[in-house]
Amino acid sequence: MTTTTELQLTFKSSAGKKKSLNLPYAVKGLSADVVREAAAAIAGEGVFVKEGEVLYAEPLAANYIERT
């Protein structure tokens, strides 16, 4: 059985909903500062929009998730 690790970023949308962005090819062991900066950059661009809602507006959390 193969185990994969992905980085899961959790954001609050502009509508106040919790949204997750999973990155299956992220480098393992990134520092908290690097992940925080990347999440802030994603939120700052505001390019992920669906029906007028910015999906990743405010970074909330980041975790590595293992899946089998």
Image (tube, grey):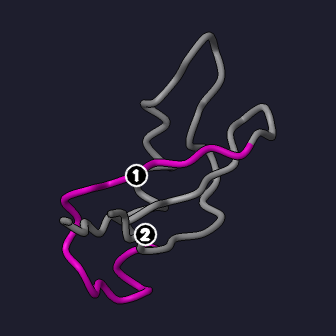
**Mark 2 residue type:** Ile
Q: How crowded is mark 2: few (under 14 residues within 10 Å), some or many (20 or more)?
A: few
* Residue 2 in the figure: left or right of residue 49: left
Residue of label 1: 22
The percent coordinates of residue 49 (x first, y second) are 52, 23
Identify the secondary structure beneath mark 2: strand
* Residue 10 in the figure: left or right of residue 31: right
Q: Check residue 4 in the rendering and tell me which mark sits there, or answer none.
A: none
Instruction: In the rendered view, tell whether residue 42 sits above or below residue 15.
Output: below
Q: Which residue is drawn at 38% across and 71% down?
A: 66
Q: Mark 1–mark 2 contact, CB under 8 Å? A: yes
Q: Which sits in the foreground, 65 or 20?
A: 65
Q: Which sits in the foreground, 66 or 53?
A: 66
For the C terminus, the quadrant is bottom left
**Mark 1 residue type:** Asn
* Residue 60 in the figure: left or right of residue 3: right
Q: Residue at x 43, y 86 (%)?
A: 32
What span is in magenta? Answer: 18-36
Instruction: In the rendered view, tell whether residue 48 sits above or below residue 9.
Output: above
Instruction: In the rendered view, tell whether residue 31 sits above or below residue 44.
Output: below
Residue of label 2: 65
